[in-house]
Image (spheres, rainbow, N blue to C red):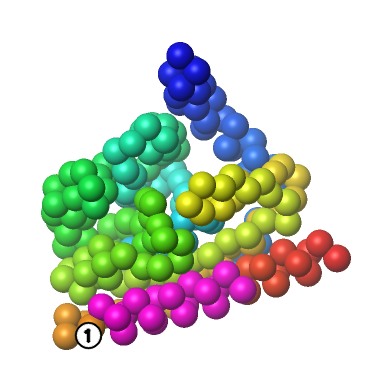
């Protein structure tokens, strides 16, 4: 009963609650032109961020009919329903359920220039900050570019299971930092690509942390 109540509360109040939290913050966004430049050039784009900060690009890029991927478990159902209300098209699947189906859907979307798909390369169940193959392999097969992004807020809550999932508190400042496009060739090894993506994401995370630390002084 409690789980069912949480589910319905999340679906009906999730959108206005997130809008309140994230719209009452000041946004300091850097590097957004990397996304616009890639889309304007007719490329398909994979937005990649670590799972802990996914709500920042989730909210910043909402309302633009972009694509996102969510798992099939209960919490993911809530996120996907909220995402649809916020203007996302949500694909459902994970490595343990509907994996092949959602991967084929992902490739189909990325093979159509001008589409954007947001992915957490270490999600949905970790390990934290260790990329899985999905986003990288999809980029290699379709020619899509990966644009890494990291974010932090001056005030946030942290909810921990396999990862510490961050939710911005209201009336602070959010730093979102988009990096340069990463292009991976088919003949590059997954290990080399994963190292490049990890280095880029961790560098942006450090920049975002430095930005909010400067705001907190």
Image quarter of residue 195: bottom left
Q: Is 202 colored magenta in this rendering?
A: yes
Q: Nearer the viewer, residue 35 or 82?
A: 82
Boundaries of the magenta span: 190-206
Whole-percent x, y for residue 210 in the image: 70, 72
Can residue 162 be seen here? The reply is yes
Tag 1 residue:
188
Task: Specify whether residue 130 is painted magenta.
Answer: no
- Name above or below for residue 215 compared with residue 191: above
Identify which residue is drawn at 18% across, 69% down.
142
Q: Residue at x 63, y 48 (%)?
A: 158
**Whether residue 33 can be seen here:** no
Farthest residue to the top: give it.
1
Position of the N terminus, as image quadrant, is top left
**x and y, in percent, of residue 26 in the image:** 70, 53
Residue 61 drawn at (x, y percent): 46, 52
Pointer 1 local density, CA inside 10 Å: few below 14, some 14–19, many at least 20: few
Does residue 95 appear left or right of residue 195 in this picture?
A: left
Please identify the dominant SS of the magenta region: helix
Q: Which is more toward the observer, 211 or 92?
A: 92
């Amino acid at each position: 009963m409690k789980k069912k109540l949480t589910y319905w509360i999340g679906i009906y109040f999730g959108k206005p609650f997130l809008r309140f939290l994230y719209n009452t913050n000041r946004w300091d966004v850097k590097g957004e032109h990397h996304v616009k430049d890639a889309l304007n050039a007719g490329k398909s784009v994979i937005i990649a961020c670590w799972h802990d900060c996914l709500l920042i690009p989730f909210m910043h890029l909402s309302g633009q009919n972009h694509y996102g991927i969510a798992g099939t478990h209960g919490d993911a159902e809530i996120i996907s329903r909220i995402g649809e209300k916020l203007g996302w098209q949500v694909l459902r699947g994970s490595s343990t359920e509907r994996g092949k189906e959602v991967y084929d859907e992902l490739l189909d979307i990325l093979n159509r220039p001008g589409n954007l798909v947001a992915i957490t390369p270490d999600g949905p169940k970790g390990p934290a900050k260790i990329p899985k193959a999905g986003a990288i392999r999809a980029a290699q097969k379709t020619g899509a570019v990966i644009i890494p992004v990291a974010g932090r807020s001056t005030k946030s809550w942290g909810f921990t299971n396999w990862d510490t999932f961050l939710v911005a508190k209201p009336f602070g400042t959010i730093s979102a930092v988009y990096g340069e496009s990463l292009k991976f060739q088919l003949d590059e090894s997954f290990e080399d690509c994963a190292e490049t993506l990890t280095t880029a994401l961790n560098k942006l995370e450090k920049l975002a942390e430095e930005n909010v630390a400067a705001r907190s002084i």
